[in-house]
Image: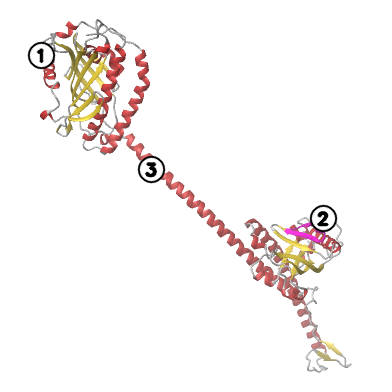
Amino acid sequence: MSDNQSWNSSGSEEDAEPRDESGHLVGMVDLSGVLSKWTNYIHGWQDRWVVLKNNTLSYYKSQDETEYGCRGSLCLSKAVITPHEFDECRLDISVNDSVWYLRAQDPEHRHQWIDSVELHRADSGYGSESSLRRHGSMLSLTSATSGFSATSTSSFKKGHSLREKLSEMETFRDILCRQVDTLQKYFDGCSDAVSKDELQRDKIVEDDEDDFPNTRTDGEFLHNNHGSKEKLFQTVSPKGINGIDFKGEAITFKATTAGILATLSHCIDLMVKREDSWQKRVDKEMEKRRRIEEGYKSALNELKKKSHFGGPDYEEGPNSLINEDEFFDAVEAALDRQDKIEEQSHTEKIRIQRSSPVPPGDVYSSIGTHRFSEKVEEMVQNHMTYSLQDVGGDANWQLVVEEGEMKVYRREVEENGIVLDPLKATHSVKGVTGHEVCHYFWDTTYRNDWETTIENFNVVETLSDNATIVYQTHKRVWPASQRDVLYLSAMRKILANNENDPDTWLVCNFSVDHDDAQPSSRCVRAKINIGIICQTLVSPPEGDKEISRDNILCKITYVANVNPGGWAPASVLRAVAKREYPKFLKRFTSYVQEKTAGKPILF
């Protein structure tokens, strides 16, 4: 396959346009002349010597400087030629983002340049014969060595993408391959010429040994027997072999390699910029990943903590891994959740009206006959003696909460590191009697309506009409252990010593033991001693009016002594007590007011 055929395999043979013997399109001629080129906003239009040759458009500062190399060039293979819409002498030639703005002397010259450029552009397919020929002065030494590409001196000023530069590198590769082939042909021709000359010289020496001609001083000519001059060695001219301009090819070869180096340098710059951009992205992603990993580790630690909720290291106790602040936060959060649940269910509880027959007062006046009778009587007397005492004096009661008529006091007591602080609260509630308050406090029928801390309860034994043994478990508040309580609950009406004493009722709850409710490992058994004393004060109605609930005031004294049964941070227990006891007392008294509203007064 010939060189022409091999290069035409890229598709040029499909071109149906007529070509001359050299492979160029018929009518395509080289063109050169003066055109005005727009340089910049400062210098405006400047005359330049423009050369159109071998599918390349080059320009020089003047015709005299053509031997020093062009100032810029455009390969017309992908050029777009645009005649100006309004200026009849102007044409714009663009390759990618490099644009030359040119003006001819008149419209005829512009038309001539446009036609010639279009023919060269159509002929610029690299599969054609002309593409195998040297591309003239496509790159000058000046433009190549100064770091600009073959497309234009302004190519790098505007900046090309890496893809465009790689495409440009492919063009350089094709040109360089053709130039290497051309130079190789030249070297092969020179070698063949030298070989032929040596053979001819050896033949002459052998035939004319006896009549060797004299050598003149020029050393180039020999005199034969006839006295005429003959050249012994045919001088090979620069264009003597296949018409190749060796000097021009060498210059172009050097310029092409310089262009390749410049383009490679630009590619490296682009890749460095991209590397910086990608490095920033990588740093950003690394920072994002670091934050995600920190969040993951934090969530994992929380999950590990939660997974050990049932383990001994995270239970309450002096050696618990949970510090006091975490303990308090957890307890408070759990209590808040319980309050929200209670608010949601409060309306439903009020809607469901429960009623149970209220035994006559005489039932609660007697001590009863059961095995705990003496213990009940002892607890009742203690509450009546000590619970009603004034909080002043040496009792060391501290006022911790005061909200309207309600006051809550506390005495700080610890035993073996366990907080046993007694609490005492006083409150006054209008419109209810002491009997009514104690009834709703003692009767388990209403217990779940106002008590929000209980998980479940049951009556273990009914001792009498006014005394029962109750077992109840309280909702767990993590990280504290779950508590249960077994207590005897007794309700008593206190007999008045004189007619001026107020009507007084009492409910006392104190811990006992029972065979049917033994302590278990699931809960910590707490010990309690609680008393609520309610005194009814009646103000005389006006005139002959009957006593109404507006004339009734119940004075409540609530005393609680609780042993939690296990260790917990003192600050947590005291903070919870300070928060929960006032809420409990207000919730309960409000419930009693709602239940008794509109009903007959129960003394």
Q: Earlier in the sequence, mark 3 or mark 2?
A: 2
Q: Are marks 3 and 2 in contact (CB under 8 Å)?
A: no
Q: Amino acid at mark 2?
A: Asp
Residue drawn at x 29%, y 11% is: 596
Report the disc number at residue 374. Answer: 1
Q: Position of residue 503 (x, y in %)?
A: 17, 12
**Residue on which disc 3 sits:** 297
Q: CA distance from mark 2 to mark 1?
A: 125 Å
Disc 3: CA contacts within 10 A as few (<14), some (14-19) or many (>=20): few
Left or right: residue 359 versus residue 184 is: left
Q: Report the side of 164 relative to 295 (left or right).
A: right
Pointer 2: what residue?
Answer: 15
Question: Residue 409, how many percent across, how many down?
Answer: 19, 28
Residue 423, by quadrant, is top left
Determine the CA span between mark 3 and mark 2. Answer: 69 Å
Residue stretch rendered in magenta on the structure: 79-94
The residue mark sitting in front, 3 or 1, is 1
